[in-house]
Amino acid sequence: MKYFRTLLGSTLIAASCAAAPTAFGAEKAVIYQAFQSIQYLPLYVAMNEGLFTKYGLEVQKVTAGGGAQGVAAVIGGHADFSLQDPMTAVLANLKGASLVNVAMVVAGVPVWMVAPPNSPIKSVADLKDQTISAALPPSTSTYLLQNLLKEKGLSGVKLNTVSIGTEISPVTAGRAAAATLYQPQVEQALANGYKIVHDFAKQYDGVYAFSTIDTLKSTIQKRPQMVQGFVSAIADAEKLMQTSPQVAYRVAVAEFPTLEKSVVEAAVKRMLDQKIYPATPSISKAAFQAGLDLQVSIGNIKKGEVTYDSAVDNSFAEKAGAK
């Protein structure tokens, strides 16, 4: 997160709206996503199913390569919205930005710890004096793992940190006993006989603001109808995913054509079943506080430094849910 502070601090310049409404036709909006991720499926469903068009919007999606870069794009006026860990926007605000989180996209913790089928590790308690593979920080999965080990008093556990998406490699090479993974790597591991030894998703049960959409306060002031349309489209997508899972499967398979269809569908099903994909875009106080508590625990944010009301504007999500 120190990297976030440095990158964001260097980009806190006067911001302007990235896209002005056109005289005719749809109003343009740009969103920067941290990564192309199956976790962000509500956004892809909204785009693929024409839900933004329903609200008069023409949306362009750009992959930033990281959460901090996405937030920086919003601050710098290159984007109207960004999608990543809401705490990235919070950290930017602590450096002088004026961002607000307006919609939930990932409402639980999409992280699971897996071990080989013949491993004696069956739970967190069995990790004593073991090595676990995890993503290089800054990564919420690694922070969650560190916090879990701290809570369980497992000070002897070592971490082998690698590039995100390659966490299983040290296990297959015999350099780690278990790995913490995102989707779809979890389903790929399970398809190869691995077993889940800790379920962070179950631990938080859908009450964790893992990934949200943020925008500038000035954008809300100048283009409230555009923001409302954007959030309403996300709300429609999340509802559609819950009521018609086949749509979610179809869009996910189309967005990740290089992955096996069975793996993609299994990943989406697990995240629907475990409340990773929210039913609405509302960001609850409890979910936001869960994410904030983690940042306080690892020392990125001081206790009492950030409040829900200063970081979240739930009015657009509530209006979208009321229609």
Image (cartoon, rainbow, N blue to C red):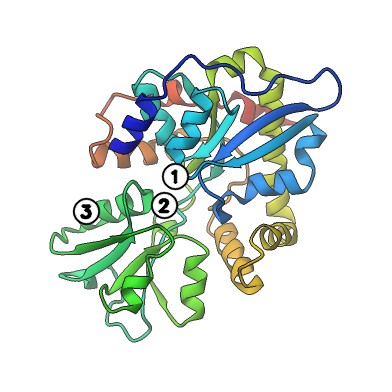
The kind of secondary structure element at disc 3 is helix
Front residue of 66 and 189: 66
Pick whichever of labels 3 and 2 is earlier in the sequence.
Answer: 3
Could you tell me how far apart the alpha carbons at marks 2 and 1 are, in whole angstroms? 7 Å
Residue at the farthest bottom position: 118
Could you tell me how far apart the alpha carbons at marks 1 and 3 are, in whole angstroms? 18 Å
The residue sitting at 48% across, 76% down in the picture is 190
In this picture, residue 80 sits left or right of residue 148: right
The residue labelled by disc 1 is 208
Q: Quadrant of the C terminus?
A: top right
Residue at the farthest left position: 156
The kind of secondary structure element at disc 2 is helix
- The image shows residue 121 at horizontal and vertical percentages of 28, 77
The residue labelled by disc 3 is 151
Q: In which quarter of the image is the N terminus?
A: top left
| Amino acid type assigned to the residue bearing label 3 in the image | Glu
Q: Is residue 293 above or below residue 143?
A: above
The residue sitting at 70% across, 33% down in the picture is 232
Asked whether the beta carbons under mark 2 and mark 1 sit within 8 Å of each other, the answer is yes
Front residue of 305 and 140: 140
In this picture, residue 104 sits left or right of residue 130: right
Front residue of 1 and 262: 1
Q: Find residue 204 and name its label.
A: 2
Q: In this view, does 111 lie above or below 302?
A: below
In this picture, residue 129 sits left or right of residue 173: left
